[in-house]
Image (cartoon, rainbow, N blue to C red):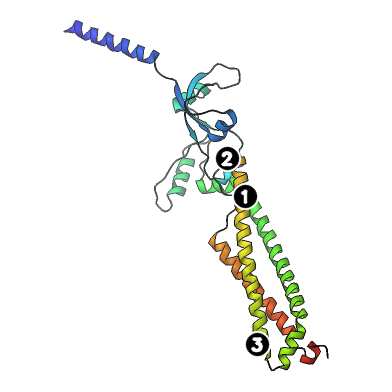
């Protein structure tokens, strides 16, 4: 019985050594940007080494990952390779050392701050930050760009409002003889004001529709270009329903104000002055 036991144990050991000798290479996943730059595909065998020209391990590309829609990753130009933890430690020689790690807490109010405080109180040499704080710090550049775009938007709106008012005044002034003839026929000032305001409002609505179409087209071109440059699904330009409603309401309000000012300037003059008599 003992002899059979030892024979079975020897067979298992030999079988394990044979399986280890015939074991496939370790698998890794690579970033799609790296795959596009080096023309790698799933199933390819590559040599992975800690430094150029150094000895490394042959590995197989098991999957190609896509970058997430995270603004903080856009500024990073490095490529990403994911390995098994023990393989990474053996390859880098780092042992039981890590640069950073993430801890997920329960969905309880105050759990994140409490966990960060307890981790920071354990030892010196490291610091725990909530994920929201990290996102804010890494997105500082995008906040500056957002403020810059808001400033440009305010300047553009003010300039367009002045331009709209000037165009409306010129258009209404060109029709002063027609308005004077209508006034002589008995058309009231209120009717003239309503007609001018209605026309200016229709022009503002048509302009809003054209602006929305141009915005959608421009946003599509911008996203297509920069998503290809950075290999990311992040949308760099978006036109949301809230933006459309705000732009349409603002355009309509500016059109009504411009039409009202132009109409009031026109109806205050005498009918005979409008027709040139």
Image coordinates for residue 129, horizontal then vertical, percent: 52, 44
Q: Secondary structure at mark 1?
A: helix
**Residue at 61%, 53% in the rendered image:** 219
> How busy is the neighbourhood of tag 1: few (under 14 within 10 Å), some, or many (20 plus)?
few
Question: How many numbered marks appear?
Answer: 3
* Mark before the other along the chain sequence, 1 or 2: 1
Tag 2 residue: 231
Is 196 above or below relative to 143?
A: below
Identify the mark at residue 191; answer none if there is no mark. 3
Extreme-left residue of the structure = 1
Is residue 95 at all visible to an observer of this figure?
no
Specify which label sits upstream in the sequence, 3 or 2: 3
* Cα distance in 3D space between marks 3 and 2: 58 Å
Seen from the viewer's position, the closer of residues 277 and 15 is: 277
In the displayed image of the protein, which residue is found farthest to the top? Answer: 3
The residue tagged 1 is 221
75 horizontally vs 16: left or right: right
Q: Residue at x 64, y 71 (%)?
A: 204
């Amino acid at each position: 019985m003992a002899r059979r036991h030892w024979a079975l144990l020897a067979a298992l050991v030999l079988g394990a050594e044979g399986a280890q000798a015939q074991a496939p290479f370790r698998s890794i996943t690579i970033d799609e940007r790296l795959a596009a730059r080096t023309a790698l595909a799933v199933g390819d065998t590559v040599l992975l080494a800690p430094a150029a020209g150094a000895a490394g391990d042959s590995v197989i590309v098991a999957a190609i990952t896509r970058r997430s829609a995270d603004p903080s990753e856009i500024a990073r130009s490095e490529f990403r390779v994911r390995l098994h933890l023990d393989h990474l430690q053996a390859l880098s020689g780092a042992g039981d050392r890590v640069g950073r790690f993430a801890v997920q807490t329960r969905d309880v109010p105050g759990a994140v701050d409490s966990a960060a405080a307890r981790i920071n109180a354990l030892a010196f040499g490291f610091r725990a930050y909530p994920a929201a704080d990290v996102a804010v710090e890494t997105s500082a550049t995008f906040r500056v760009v957002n403020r810059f775009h808001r400033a440009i938007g305010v300047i553009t709106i003010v300039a367009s409002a002045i331009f709209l008012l000037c165009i409306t005044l010129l258009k209404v002034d060109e029709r002063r003889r027609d308005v004077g003839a209508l006034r002589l026929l008995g058309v009231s000032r209120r009717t003239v004001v309503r007609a001018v305001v209605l026309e200016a409002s229709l022009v503002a609505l048509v302009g809003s529709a054209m602006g929305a179409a141009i915005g959608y087209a421009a946003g599509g071109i911008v996203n297509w270009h920069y998503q290809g440059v950075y290999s990311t699904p992040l949308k760099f330009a978006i036109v949301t329903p809230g933006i459309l409603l705000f732009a349409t309401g603002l355009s309509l309000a500016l059109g009504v104000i411009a039409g009202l000012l132009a109409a009031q300037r026109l109806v205050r003059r005498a009918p005979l002055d409008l027709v040139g008599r």
